[in-house]
Image (cartoon, rainbow, N blue to C red):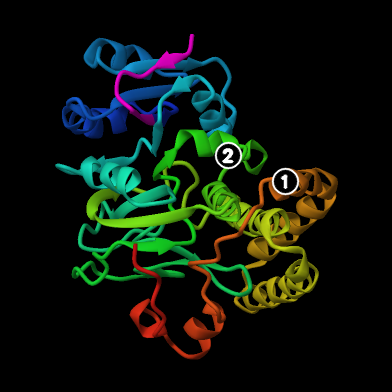
Amino acid sequence: MPINCIQDTAVVILSYNGRKWHEQFLPLIVSEANSAYDVVLADNASTDDTAQWVSENFPAVHLLRLPVNRGFTGGYVAALEQIQAKYYVLLSADFEVTRNWFPPLHQAMTRIPNLAACQPKIRYWRERESFEYAGAAGGFIDKWGYLFCRGRIFDTLEKDLGQYDDPIEIFWATGGCLMVDAAIYHQIGGLDADMYAHMEEVDLCWRIKNAGYRIGYIGDSTVFHVGGSVISYGSPQKLFYNYRNNLVLLLKNERSSRLLWLMSWRLILDGVSALQLLSKGQWKSVGTIFKAHMNFYGHLRLWLRHRKQAQSVVKVPNSEGRYPNSIVWAYFAKGLKTFDALNWSPKKL
């Protein structure tokens, strides 16, 4: 049965055996809803008592039971097809919201022209003064297709001192707490379930920007992320999807005039990265990178079909949020560890 939301926004929490997170975080999410948003918990075929517990303790929450676990991205794809709302907020189960976290996001979506998606400030739940790895203060992409955030470049997490409170236009917003216009989400094809997990939100945002819309960071809203609950940081699985899905991301969304030489260079750069890991004796990581590339090329026909679909929605691409230089060179060769040190300013919203 489709869920028809009373409010214009559905906060959708995908859950797999997530009761421990809901016990901690769901009470404030529900109390902050008031008459601002509906809460939907999409149970991704959990094997524990999550669905029953939520149903008994939070009757106001819409419970959507997915019969088959299709992974993180596939779970959201299946859930959002069944939810009727003007806006979606994709909120991972391991996120803690704060008081008044929602109004700044909603105001941005309703008042800023051409804004199709946005994210709040993401701080680290375990080190609460620091930005968090997956999203921080907004996501960007460099000339070679490498991703980074304002407040987090590679493994360097900055302290939040209010330096990134200003609302800006970004290239991608974190999928852990992503507010998106539902009509535009479906118009551009939604999340790509074949990516499974990791970078699927970047792919979505890139397609949104290729269709001519804007992505925003709203620093007046703050949430905290535990992190690593879907795919553990530093795990071989995360490394695999990091390398494979970055290639998928470029193939699907990059313009043709850049694609051939960029993919060739990325093959070289990923090889250099593997050699560095090899010099440190990290044989398993080198093998994982090799597997990621073999998987990508082994399914090239699939990804080329995805590119055809992605390119069909391209109108007047919006390139705001593309860092014109190499973030790898800036970070490792020049020692620029913070976003401010790049001496590059994103566009204000």
Residue 12 lies left or right of residue 56; in this view the side is right
Q: Is residue 49 visible?
A: no
Q: Position of residue 263 (x, y in %)?
A: 76, 68
At 23% from the left and 47% from the top, the residue drawn is: 104
Q: Is residue 177 magenta?
A: no
- Left or right, 147 with reference to 114: right
Q: Earlier in the sequence, mark 2 or mark 1?
A: 2
Going 24% across and 16% down the picture, which residue do you hit? 58
Where residue 306 sits, quadrant-wise, is top right
Where residue 3 sits, quadrant-wise, is top left
The numbered mark at residue 191 is 2
Q: Which residue is denoted by mark 1 in the rendering?
A: 312
Left or right: residue 162 compared with residue 143:
left
Q: Nearer the viewer, residue 270 or 9?
A: 9
In the image, which is nearer the foreground, mark 2 or mark 1?
Answer: 1
Q: Position of residue 166 (x, y in %)?
A: 26, 65
Q: Nearer the viewer, residue 319 or 323?
A: 319
Label 2 secondary element:
loop
Q: Looking at the figure, which quarter contains the C terminus?
A: bottom left
Q: Report the residue at 76% width, 53% height from top.
A: 296
The stretch drawn in magenta includes residue 4:
yes
Is mark 2 in CB contact (under 8 Å) with mark 1?
Answer: no
Occupied quadrant, residue 158: bottom left
Span shown in magenta: 1-12
95 with respect to 88 (left or right): left
Residue furthest bottom as drawn:
334
